[in-house]
Amino acid sequence: MPKNYSYPLDLTWSTDEISSVLHFLNQVENAYETKASVKSLLDSYVIFKSVVTSKSQEKQIDREFEKSSGYSTYRAVQAAKKKGKGFISLGK
């Protein structure tokens, strides 16, 4: 997985919205690179969903992010929901 990759951001978003999306994507990165708190990841996902309201846009962001980073937002959220509490680590 490349160390330098771009984030799938919409330039029409406000600074706060971009910050919220980046925070969620950083939580996903943490889940793959080290570990992430289930609560932090799911809380940031709720805020992410307030910015990205359409399912198709969410899927597009997941595809673009996974293509550039190797990390799946979908798999991270599903793992966090399944675990329920504590921490998750999706690294190999």
Image (spheres, rainbow, N blue to C red):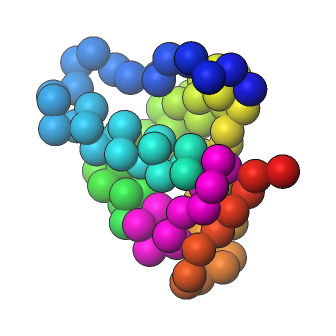
Rendered view: 68 above or below 81: above
Q: Nearer the viewer, residue 65 or 32?
A: 32
Rendered view: 33 above or below 58: below
Residue 74 visible (yes or no): no
Q: Quadrant of the N terminus?
A: top right
Prevailing SS of the magenta stretch:
helix
Q: Nearer the viewer, residue 13 or 26?
A: 26
Give the quadrant of residue 71. top right
In percent of the image, x 50 and y 70: which residue is there?
37
Residue 55 visible (yes or no): yes
> Which region of the structure is painted magenta?
31-42
Check if residue 38 falls in the magenta segment. yes
In percent of the image, x 69 and y 62: which residue is there?
89
In percent of the image, x 44 and y 74: which residue is there?
39
Q: Residue furthest right?
A: 92
Residue 11 location, x and y as percent?
27, 15
Q: Nearer the viewer, residue 52 or 65?
A: 65
Check if residue 43 falls in the magenta segment. no
Give the quadrant of residue 26. top left
Give the quadrant of residue 52. top left
Rendered view: 32 above or below 15: below
The number of numbered badges drawn on the structure is 0
Residue 61 location, x and y as percent?
53, 30
Q: Is residue 38 left or right of residue 34?
A: left
Rendered view: 46 above or below 60: below
In percent of the image, x 52 and y 72: which residue is there?
38
